[in-house]
Amino acid sequence: MNQTISLLLCILLSLFSFSADAMADYNIVNFGAKLDGRTDSAAALQAAWRKACNETLSATVVVPKGRFFVSRALLQGPCNNNDLRVVILGTITADSGFSSASEWITFKYVQGLSVQGGTFDARGQALWACKAARRSCPFGSTAVTISGSKDVLVNGTKVMNSENFQMAVIFSQGVTMQGLTITAPANSPNTDGVHVHMSTGVTITGSSMSTGDDCISLGPGVTDAWIYNISCGPGHGISIGSLGWSPGEPGVENVTVSSVVFTGTQNGFRVKTWANPYGGFVKDILFQHATMIDVQNPIVIDQNYCPNNNCPNNNSGIKISGVKFSEVEGTSTTEVAVKLDCSQSNPCQGIELDNIKLSYSGENMQAEAQAFCRNVQGRSTGYVIPPSCL
Ligand SMILES: *[C@@H]1O[C@H](CO)[C@@H](O)[C@H](O)[C@H]1NC(C)=O
Ligand SMILES: *[C@@H]1O[C@H](CO)[C@@H](O)[C@H](O)[C@H]1NC(C)=O
Ligand SMILES: *[C@@H]1O[C@H](CO)[C@@H](O)[C@H](O)[C@H]1NC(C)=O
Ligand SMILES: *[C@@H]1O[C@H](CO)[C@@H](O)[C@H](O)[C@H]1NC(C)=O
Ligand SMILES: *[C@@H]1O[C@H](CO)[C@@H](O)[C@H](O)[C@H]1NC(C)=O
């Protein structure tokens, strides 16, 4: 070979390896993942993740079609790139038993991540049965957790049958979830669809959730959340709370929940605080454009939550202000379609009912929908049926 040819080859080779780097794909099968649905592919998934995370340009982890058993996986950063993609064509399944772990699949400390497609089947049935039998059981794992991360997209992903929360977003910023399908039976305990905690700029859109607990729950420290076009049911509705469980909780601020169809849920739009003295706040919340189809409690503010009656002074220290319910229509299966039950020591302020039309659809032929107010200040605008108690 003369020098010119070897130089050309050398250039070609380096071009090739550059382009291979730029679109690095790491298929978990190449790291030993098995399609049989039985062999534990956790190590393969984590090895593929580490390779992709180590790339300096964008990189993709591919989970091909088929069922992969993953006992548990922590997919952790920080990574060398901020365009890490996880493309899931198949199904990732959990063990059919249960352990004391609190998370199953976790993405942690990543900046610039997108998870596309896929099904996560957490197989929570054994733990629900344990809880139903009132044996002493662990709390259960959250199926998919986004933790301590920034600029994350989860798109077109299905999550089912989690032991505990189906998805959780905690200590994160800028997380968009679109086109989620979340399913668990109506009687499965604590299977909230998406639980958000201590996070800013979380967007959840175009998703369908049927669960045994809240479709979406927003806990302490959630700010600038945007939730749009959700179908919820069965489930316990979309809630802010429970807040005030412990001292020093950061408040919840600037949340919009818009365009939701609730079908046969326990609640619709709800704000819930423990009847505990710990301070905190909820402010600037807009709940709008909802259809309630046979919902037990369509509109709820409940500051007297204390299921075991061990809340010493029976009063919530959380200040709730600037909560607007607008354009809410449909049916309530209990007479109290609107319940605004605030704290005696911290009355709610600036609560607004605007264009509400809820009728009673329960079994009592004589009954009509009503609104209930306690310790609440605010106003109503437009039409408000049942008649406003503000
Ligand atoms: C990480 O990437 C660097 C190049 O950026 C490479 O030299 C190193 O071998 C990679 N490490 C692993 C474990 O893949
Ligand atoms: C999610 O994926 C769908 C279908 O591929 C696409 O149309 C949509 O733009 C994606 N959403 C985001 C936020 O990128
Ligand atoms: C609402 O979400 C559903 C999926 O649940 C989607 O098919 C539909 O296109 C979305 N509509 C709008 C207006 O975004
Ligand atoms: C409220 O949150 C939205 C995102 O949902 C954001 O665009 C907006 O700037 C926030 N408003 C304030 C006053 O921070
Ligand atoms: C606490 O408040 C609830 C609802 O306001 C009431 O039903 C209950 O009797 C109260 N309990 C005590 C101990 O004051």
Image (tube, rainbow, N blue to C red):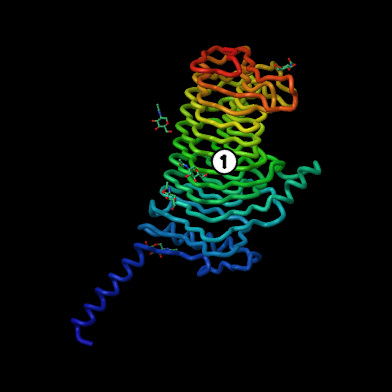
Outermost residue on the bottom side: it is 1
- Residue 346 seen in the figure: no
User: Around disc 1, counting alpha carbons within 10 Å, would you say few (fewer than 14), some (14 to 19), or many (20 or more)?
Assistant: many
Outermost residue on the left side: it is 4
- Where is residue 335? Give x, y as percent: 69, 22
Outermost residue on the front side: it is 365
Q: On the image, which quarter does residue 376 sit in?
A: top right
- Where is residue 11? Give x, y as percent: 24, 73
Badge 1 residue CB within 8 Å of ligand 3: no
Q: Which residue is pictured at 50% across the width and 52% down the height? A: 76
Nearest to the observer: residue 177 or residue 208: 208
Q: Which residue is pictured at 25% across the width and 78% down the height? A: 9
Residue 385 appears left or right of 202: right
Disc 1 marks a residue whose amino acid type is Val
Q: Which residue is pictured at 57% across the width and 55% down the height? A: 119
- Where is residue 193? Give x, y as percent: 59, 42
Is residue 24 shown above or below 263? below
- Where is residue 214? Give x, y as percent: 62, 36
Residue under label 1, please give it.
194
Secondary structure, mark 1, is strand
Nearest to the observer: residue 148 or residue 205: 205
- Quarter of the image containing the N terminus? bottom left
- Quarter of the image containing the C terminus? top right
Q: How many discs mark residues in the rendered view?
A: 1
Is residue 244 shown above or below 30? above
Nearest to the observer: residue 328 or residue 145: 328
